[in-house]
Amino acid sequence: MKYKFLFSLSLLITFATSIFSQNVFFIKYNDTVPKEEIELKVAQDQFIPSGIQFQVNAELESVNYLAKGIAKNDERLGRIVKLTFKDDVDESAIIRLQNLDPAIEYIQKATTYKSDFAPNDSLISEQWALEKVKAFDAWDKTQGADTVLLGFIDTGIDYDHPDLKNKIWQNPGETGNGKESNGIDDDNNGFIDDYRGWDFTDRVGFPFDTSGGDYLDWDNDPKDEQGHGTFISGIAGAQTNNLTGIAGAAPNIQLVNLRAFDPAGYGEEDDVAAAILYAVQMNVKVINMSFGDNAFSLVLKDVIQFAYSKNVVLIGSSGNSGSPDPHYPSGYSEVICVGNSTIDDFVASNSNYGSTLDLVAPGTQVLTTARKNNYSTINGTSASTPHVAATAALILSLQNFTNEEVKQILKSTTDDIGEPGWDIKSGAGRLNMFKAVTVVAPSVIKFNHPRQDFATLDDTLIINATVLSGLFSNFNLVYGTGLNPDDWTPLIENGLNQFSNENIYELNLAALPDTVYCLRLVVQLTNGRTLEERVNFFINRTPPIADLISVGPAFYGDKTTVLAAMVTDEPSITRMYYRKIGETDFNFVTLDGFTTNNQFVKYLHYGFIPKQLVDQNSAYEVYFEAENLVGLKTIDDNGGQYYSFITNYDAEYAAETMLSYSLPPGSLFEDPVNITSNDFNEIYLRELTNARVSSLYRMSNNSFEFVDTLSDRIVRDFGDFNNNGLKDLLTFFVRDGFIYEQQNQNSSSFTQKYSDESGTFWPVMAEDIDGDNITEVVVVSSDTSATIWEANNDLTLSNPENLYNYTPSTFGFNILDSPQGVVADIDDDGTNEIWFVDVDGDIFSHDILGPNNFNQELYFQLHSLDHLHSLMQVIITEMGKRNLQSFFVR
């Protein structure tokens, strides 16, 4: 049964420390602006042209070239300048300057990226991945040349690790005769004493934290303080034949240490851009980028294209959210996109997939180096990417191929582990290093136009491509509707000619509706293989249809602001224009969730006016604008009347007391526990700098004392699951689940009683949900289903009941990508439901009718994409806690 509810939500908005105010913007000037004029702006710290009436409400700290001028002489990148403000800034005013100054091509706020790390289950004793990809056979052909540099843009590398210290690239222009520390730029590259790489982190706008490590300024010490970079670089380049630890996939390749991420694993867009430009300058041949976001960045796209034009091989992780949507930078046409394969040649369930995927490589239970001379196993596309990057470096050790040739070598030599040929989950297949290093005559298959994310409102589309191969037999060109179509329309069948950078087809778009399409170029080779390239493009001839879901006052910390949510029928940017009643001009914020004015392009949009821009106890009027990819706009101004609200703040503060004790920064298990006593005075914490370990702390004598740890486990639920007087823990790592039982009463030591490492046991909860006095263990068991198990007395599990996601698949996927759920009687009919939320934002339930008896009940279809499902998970959790249909989101 389907019900449609109109929710009226009062939202209490709070922020985690991962949301940063950066106060950094990029301006790119168009080609008509003389380079001398841009140089003058930088020299004078000036960006507002004379004759333009324009002000911002923050003090300007500096105007500088992108990445501190590394590429200022480049015709394109030299037109990008970086604005840094000392204080909070009226972001909408900065963006508005683009409309006032015709010399500006675009203005963009700096973006923060998160490294694509997904922790694993347990340590293993051998490197299965190297055997799987035939690395040992490849080494008979080449172990790499030390003249080929492989760069890692990451959290840095632990250069003191015994398996890495002899593999770190040493800058010959800054080594010897004390050059390492003489304070002189000996090689005149703009970096002083960069003898072992560079630390590009300079968190101008991040909260200052004296315990947060080295993250405030550029310097010549790129040591890893987080761990991710040491994991990734070890997979590719750990030293071999040294009687120590592991072997890297490219034994003789030098590793260039490009630190752009801080101790928490976050990196600013400018730092990543600077690292890429430095790598190009220092003749790095391959760049590994095990990080990303679903946001589209104009600045990073320009820098990626610059590096690509210099023949750099760019390799990125596809992401770990199990999503078919593009993930950047790996989603750019210029970047080789790598997914995660398992020891059994399956594709990991949380590995992103889709038309931008090129191939997969081992990324599950991969043994590698860890900080402080340790070793560990990791999971995720971050671990897959360095296998491919190392292989690219080996290929270039044999011959100086172009980056496109390297891409096709990698794709044409894979082992097919999915459907024959290219498929949506595994791309071209799983990496085979030996086959890759034996290719002497590579192919080039690519779309020159359109490139990924191209948008048009024209009635025709010129398709320009290149097909060159010594094994060429024929090619086919087709297109389909959607990001990842199932049905295809042929354009060219059995094409018998090869071509380079030629217009091969003029596609008539006149009769095609506005949506996203996929072009597919399939080349048949004489050896029986196929090579395939795909690219997505958009047709946007009409303004977007924009539906306002909700708008109204919302608590924002200690103030009231205006919050809104809007759905568009096509990828769009949405803006909320606002002004205080009595004023003339409107300002705006883009509806970008918990960031503002990043101008994200998506379907579902939500956001609010930053509190520093809102006066309290004042009347405001707002209206909305939705703009699609080609600039067509739709206005919602409430029929010309605007939407009006008053920012009254009538909340009462609770008492505030500064406590004398504290804990390290990290993530807490949501409830107190009573492991070593009958008092609930203990907590589980995963520290920020050691997130693989769950540490037990006990409150004693008005302070927290450390008790014990669980390694490679995240606590999901706690209780006595089999009623035998011993405490039990439901835990997980990645999508694998484990049940532990206390060895003795009041002991902090646990014994593992049950495990499921199949990737189909992602724990949600452990409690008696159907009233039969038996603990049920609820898990996410597939992309579209959950399973409810019963716990036996020995803590094994039995009697599984599958609950399926029955909601309409509006955007082509109903994926459960997070282990979240809640049991509550939301419709107040006396019967509890169990609630879940999927990727496209549908909240759905199953009635709990009795022991092992579940029935599909009601759902809310909210048409959400991107990250709104995370907000929905918070909502259903609060629904369960409060049993309310109007509720607060914390």
Image (cartoon, helix red, strand yellow):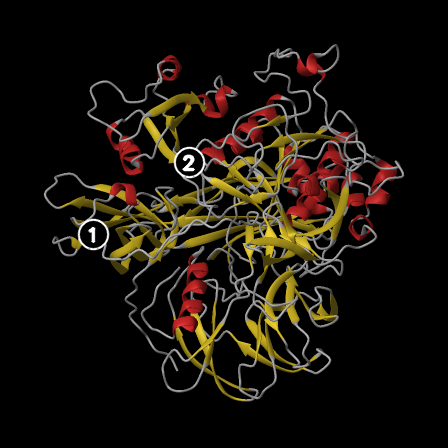
**First of labels 2, 1 by sequence position:** 2
Q: Position of residue 443 (x, y in %)?
A: 68, 39
Look at 42% across and 36% down and name the residue there. Answer: 22
Between residue 505 and residue 15, name the one nearer to us. 15
Q: Is residue 594 left or right of residue 130?
A: left
Name the kind of residue labelled 2 in the image: Gln
Task: Name the residue that disc number 2 marks.
Answer: 22
On the rendered structure, is 48 left or right of 274?
left
Q: CA distance from mark 2 to mark 1?
A: 26 Å
Q: Which mark identifies residue 546?
A: none
* Amino acid bearing label 1: Thr
| Above or below for 345 versus 21 | below
If the image is split into quadrants, where does the C terminus sit?
bottom left
- Picture layout, residue 516 above or below residue 839: above
Q: Secondary structure at mark 2?
A: loop
Could you say which quadrant of the image residue 249 lies in? top right
Give the numbered dot on residue 647. Answer: 1
Q: Residue at x 19, y 50 (%)?
A: 622
Quick check: 792 left or right of 849? Answer: right
- Identify the residue at the far left of this view: 582
Indicate left or right for 409 with 21 as reference: right
